Image (cartoon, rainbow, N blue to C red):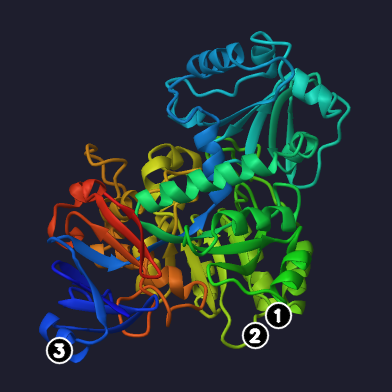
Amino acid sequence: MATLWFGGTIYTMVNEHETVEAILVEDGTILETGSVATLQEKYENRINEKINLQGKVLYPGFVDSHIHLIGHGEKLLRLDLSAATSAEEVLQLVEEKVKTTPHNEWIIAEGWDENQWKTPRIIHRKELDAITSNHPIIMKRICRHALIANTYALTLSGVTNDVKEPQGGIVDREEDGTITGFLVDEAQQLVTSKMPLPSENYLQRALQLSVQDAFSKGLTGAHSEDLNYYGGFLRTYETFQQVINGSKTKFRAHLLAHYGVAEDAFSYADHHEDPFIEIGAMKIFADGSLGGRSALLSKPYEDDETTQGVAIHTQDELSDLVKKARTFGRTVAIHAIGDLAFEYVITSLEKHPPKAGQRDRIIHAQILRPDLIERAKTLPMILDIQPRFVASDFPWVEERLGHERMKSCYVWKTLIQKGFHCAGGSDAPIEPMDPLLGIHAAVSRKNSPASYNVYMPEEKLSVFEAVRLFTYESAYAINRENEVGLVSPGYKADFTVLNHDLFNIEEDEIPNAGVYMTVVDGTTMFQQ
């Protein structure tokens, strides 16, 4: 039997400003669109439910193209440091957490960002040691490409002053070689690999919280990278199966397979199908983050000429990983923030192209050079961008990169005009899991609605372009553009319904548009 949706503004997102009066949904799929009268007359005997939108505004379901679903749930469970404005405030928050935590239990804090502090600096392990000698502590930087560990955590992990720096990682030291507790990129594994595994209960709780939060933000699905961090592929995948069961909870989870678990993930995917959980491309890291100065640049950082960042893999190693993905018949999704990392990726994809009809993706693609943009145009790829980075990285990123280099950085409008398909994500828990904030950042190029500073206004997207990032283009990134991402016959009945019309409000009102309803497979998963 069928459901008739009507009574509001319904955007198809096929063409700008294109709307339909009503939608007929059957078995989780859009059967037909048209006028209420026509659909009621044609399908009179099949319509058993009518949903009046009460004047609200319906769009194709919003999908976050780059997120860490379990990681976002962990942020909701753990000590959150992202609002701290100083090192002293961070230490005070940790001290309060220590008071309520049993001795010898790990304390894991999330989200510190020294670039947002009045006096930016890196906290030393000895400052954590002064708070407690009875708790191992790690504090993950907001980018998750760096952490600070106290002496207890380092000792439990066997990390001493004699530790060797791993390839693709940095162990920060004082002038005499004493470690400070600050570990960057692959060096984090020195501690995180020795930590006790989280329980299955904990993982399920984290994912449940994350998915429920996603529904409240209007997300009907997400492309997530979690499978290498919680005790192996199968253990983590089964968490998704337990939470996204297809009956009580419907959510379209497209899971990237980190190269460390890719063989297990792809072998499993070849023999199992799930309508709501799909295994996608092989995930690879080419470099680190801008905040930690580990994004790989072709020239030194403007504010620290001693470094050009970190190559997680050499050029040959990265090419070999791409080649490995091709042996499984798979595409790759490669994290590349710096221009030299982007160049490594382009070279690898040119050497080992995907099969006809497949599309690779480069995640972040923030710092480019004109010559790299021209090379990338010839390749079948998606650029997986995070518009919210404009809001959180400016203005400090200009000091880090210099004015001249900024001319080809964060250039979302230029990339779209040059024919690139760009999908939109948040990278939560690094940024807030809220597509409205991403849309606002893409349209306004501001830190917040209250801000007067507009960064590179020539790179503003139209509202239509920005909404497409989180609808059609997210579908295009995984070759599902004929199934989801539009309101059109034959497409899945995944809808995001807002209280206000994004195309008819001031741009600074976008974050407050308000989610009224989130619908997946024709089933309402959230209602205001």
Q: Secondary structure at mark 1?
A: loop
Q: Nearer the viewer, residue 182 or 522?
A: 522
Q: Amino acid at mark 1?
A: Gly
Q: Nearer the viewer, mark 3 or mark 2?
A: 3
Q: Nearer the viewer, residue 331 or 293?
A: 331
Whether residue 385 is situated above or below residue 378 in the rendered picture:
above
Q: Quadrant of residue 165?
A: top right
Q: Nearer the viewer, mark 3 or mark 1?
A: 3
Q: Position of residue 419 (x, y in %)?
A: 40, 77
Q: CA distance from mark 3 to mark 1?
A: 48 Å
Q: Which one is earlier in the sequence, the residue at label 3 or at label 2?
A: 3
Whether residue 191 is situated above or below residue 360 in the rendered picture:
above
* Residue drawn at the location 72% of the way across and 66% of the way down: 265
Which residue in the structure is indicated by mark 2? 355
* The disc label shown at residue 41, or none: 3
Q: Secondary structure at mark 2?
A: loop
Left/right of residue 254 with respect to residue 392 in the rendered view = right
Q: Which one is earlier in the sequence, the residue at label 1 or at label 2?
A: 1
User: Could you tell me if the residues under marks 1 and 2 are in contact, i.e. CB atoms within 8 Å?
Assistant: yes
Q: CA distance from mark 1 to mark 2?
A: 7 Å
